[in-house]
Image (spheres, helix red, strand yellow):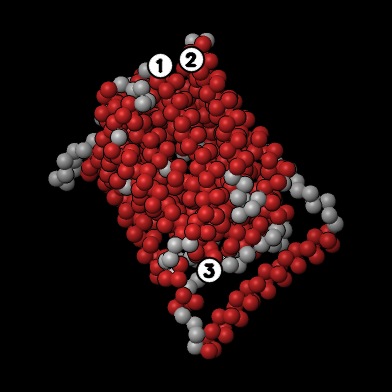
Amino acid sequence: MQAGGPHHNQGTEALHTMRARRFDDRRMRLASAADTRYERRRTGMETKSDTAPLATSITDSALSGSRLALMGAIWTLAWPAIVTFGLESLVGLVDMVMVGRLGAEPVAGVGVGTQILHAVSVVMIAVSTGTVALVARHVGAAEQEQAEQVLMQSLYAVGLISLLVAVPVFVWARPIVAVFGVAPGVVAEGEGYVRYIMLGVPCAALFLVISSGLRGAGDMRTPLFIGVFMNALNIAGNYVLIFGKLGFPAMGVRGAALASGIAFTVGVVAALVLLQRGTLVLRLRAAHLRPHLDTARRILAIGNPTALEQLLMQLGFLLYLAIAALYGTTAVAAYFIGVRILALSFLPGFGFSAAASTLVGQHLGARQPHEAERAGWEANRLAMLFLSAGGLIIFLAARPIARVFIDDPAVIRDAISFIRILAIAQPLMAADFTLGGALRGAGDTRFPLLTVIVGFYGARLGFAYLAACVWSLSLTWVWAALLGDYVARAALKAWRFQSGRWQHARV
């Protein structure tokens, strides 16, 4: 799904001239900033905030135009994000393994609770999408102060919105879980998990936005380092609180949720301290503490379509799960085990999506649309290679991996079929993730929303409903419905990115 841009056939001399001009423009902007700071030092006007590290555009490393340099820039951004998401998925796998020792109902209860958490996370994703796009644009344009203002206003917005969403879910947790149509035992387990996990949602939202802002500025490593500590704390907390170790009571699935909340609280406090000290590429400054409604509106204008997209996705997952639940609790447990396992295989998709968002946004901020296009296609190519390899490995090892999580033969059988269907879809997922990230980095967030309506609702849910409720086919056919979904979404996003219309999105 890779394609060249409109300028690939230009002569060598013209290309060198264009790149030299871009380099000179960038050098002049940086020199101007350096001159300003020198003048402040000379006149005694420099403050502590002036000596903080400036966000540096990662696009500088690709100014030579060579494919190798571009791949290096993408990988520099992608690998910390891949490791970060990988550690998060590993913690999720450990959670599922530990809860799996409690039986099928706790596994299904945590799975349902996780789906509800994902629905609540829509508000976080909405703000984080706007944060990445705007911070990347400002950093690409060498506008440090504006990038920092965006981060501060994003924190205000996501903190308020997450509270407004988490409190009602906490209060009405039981009827919300019951909407899934699962067995009474699963409802009880899911209710306990949801109530405790909602306590940590505000801190999780703040940490996600901080991580998004740093990634937009090209800093992928700080979220990784903090994430390593958070994940280690989460695993230790799971062991202590789920099974009742070190004198603590055994809390079961509630202990898993509480451990996650504690980890997010510690992580966000650490991130806020680092931002306030000015040791990162972005800083929280006193000048930005006052709410700026215009900045908040810009953030939400970009993120709202993504919020609606994710809301429709989560609603679609609920409907898809409801169809799978027609086949019994074993199908529900198999679904959530399969998703946890396959999360490891499409981790490169998340990493390259983050890299594409940052590079596309920064190149557009630096007025380099052609370089933004090259970065998007190259990130997509690398993602497809990585995900295809991972999908092949997991397809072949589906049975022994499923047995790690549970010893119920019926659940293992259903999980294996789901895992193998998802493994086949890996290259399509790569294009969906990466090109979607590129479009969002450009601020073109409305088109991915359209692909969800066509792919998820038209292809996946439409065929799954027919397979289960009209044709009475086996569960495997319900799983297979997602292939049509990813074919549609990947093809539509590739067409959109090829069109170049995203280059003119207003942010």
Q: Residue at x 38, y 48 (%)?
A: 162
CA separation in Å, label 1 and label 2 = 9 Å
Q: Is residue 463 left or right of residue 197?
A: right
The x, y position of residue 4, in whole percent, is: 75, 46
Amino acid beneath label 1: Tyr
Q: Label 1: which residue?
A: 327
In the structure shown, which secondary structural element does the residue marked by tag 2 occupy?
Answer: helix
Residue 61 against residue 234 in the figure, above or below = below
10 Å neighbourhood of mark 2: few (<14), some, or many (≥20)? some
Q: Which residue is mark 3?
A: 145
| Marked residue nearer the N-terminal end (2 or 3) | 3
Q: Tell which circle, 1 or 3, labels the residue nearer the N-terminal end.
A: 3
Specify the farthest residue to the front: 293
Q: Are marks 1 and 2 in contact (CB under 8 Å)?
A: yes
> From this viewpoint, which residue is outermost toward the left?
247
133, 279: nearer the viewer: 133
**What residue is shown at x 46% (from left), y 59% (from top)?**
153
**Residue at image coords 57%, 85%:** 39
Q: Secondary structure at mark 1?
A: loop
Q: Nearer the viewer, residue 78 or 479?
A: 479
Circle 2 or circle 3, nearest the eye: 3
Count of marks, rendered view: 3
